[in-house]
Amino acid sequence: MNASQLQPAQTQPTAAGQTLYGGVTNRRVTVRDLAAAKQRGERWAMLTAYDALTGGVFDEAGIPVLLVGDSAGNCHLGYETTVPVTMDQMVMLSAAVVRGTKRALIVGDMPFGSYQESPAQALHNAARFLKEAGVGAVKLEGGERSARSIELLVEAGIPVMAHIGLTPQSVNAFGGYPVQGRGDEAAHQLLRDAKAVQQAGAFSVVLEAVPAELAAQVTDQLAIPTVGIGAGAGCDAQVLVWTDMAGMTAGRVPKFVKQYANLRAVLGDAAREYAAEVAGGTFPAPEHTFK
Ligand code: KIV
């Protein structure tokens, strides 16, 4: 059965205890809850998380879906792109996020080289995410080109979030991070990709860096939720990389990012104040000292 054919857990609007926000709290969010949210038009937010600490903060804040993105490569592990990230690294980070959270659906992002070889390779590595990290779903990049792998994973009982438009693992082929889906042919290809992943059984699809009008059109034509990043307000859900959203990223962030805090400045100030107090001999004070 395709995810698009799943009966949602609850199709009527805003019954207390059923909505993603302010709703069920005594179990993890499931892909059925997300299907129900699309039915009733409830929009939701996804954030990335790479460790138990921040995952726990976002879980307590009620974020229903956390993506252990391979953006960990550039946001957490110090690489320039997502390309060098390995399965072992992703499993380790995902397991930490699972341990630090109680309610969010945790999605493990399949890194470059972990699924492109064959559907069998995709199944082998997706199964590692579920068995070793305990995630509830996996994400992989590609539309029509990944459809057979998505199908096999879904047949095996692994919920799959697809990712089309700008797929950062293809940075070397794209020659950077250009907006996708501009022009008639590219727009038609994006629609074909979206329909292919839905047909293959994906429970949702990330649309990255595509014109807002096209993303809205895709969203209207799909039964599964679209998750936009740089894809305008017409998507069913939005995702941001947490370090961008919270102002931890050094330097410029993409145009589509809104910074809701300036944590880099806050942490830097705390570190400087601590260092100054140590150097000046005012920390530790008597109240921080054992007698
Ligand atoms: O790796 C990641 O963080 C992602 C999101 C930007 C969708 O793929």
Image (cartoon, rainbow, N blue to C red):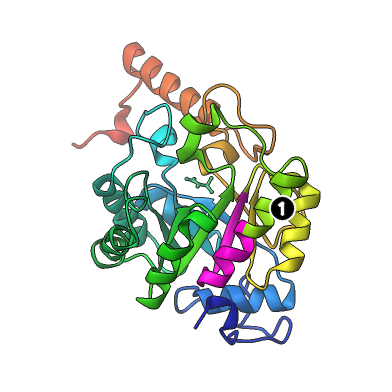
- Residue 239 spot, x, y in % from top left: 59, 51
Tell whether 200 sits left or right of 211: left
Q: Residue at x 30, y 26 (%)?
A: 284
Q: Residue at x 65, y 59 (%)?
A: 192
SS for callout 1: helix
Residue lying farthest to the front in this orientation: 185
- Residue 195 spot, x, y in % from top left: 63, 65
**Image quarter of residue 253:** top right
Tell whether 51 sits left or right of 260: left
- Residue 179 spot, x, y in % from top left: 67, 36
Tell whether 90 sits left or right of 22: left
Q: Where does label 1 land, which residue?
A: 188
Location of the C terminus (image quadrant): top left
Q: Nearer the viewer, residue 147 or 171?
A: 147
Residue lying farthest to the top in this orientation: 280
Residue lying farthest to the left in this orientation: 291
Q: Is residue 62 visible?
A: no
Considering only vertical position in the picture, is 214 above or below 271? below
Please check the rendered image and state whether residue 150 is part of the magenta-colored stretch, yes or no.
no
- Residue 254 spot, x, y in % from top left: 63, 32
Q: Nearer the viewer, residue 243 or 38?
A: 38
Image: magenta residue range = 193-207
**Image quarter of residue 204:** bottom right
Q: Amino acid at mark 1?
A: His
Please check the rendered image and state whether residue 197 is part of the magenta-colored stretch, yes or no.
yes
Q: Is residue 198 visible?
A: yes
Q: Residue at x 30, y 66 (%)?
A: 130
Q: Nearer the viewer, residue 116 or 112?
A: 116
Q: Residue at x 52, y 29 (%)?
A: 264
Considering only vertical position in the picture, is 163 above or below 199? above
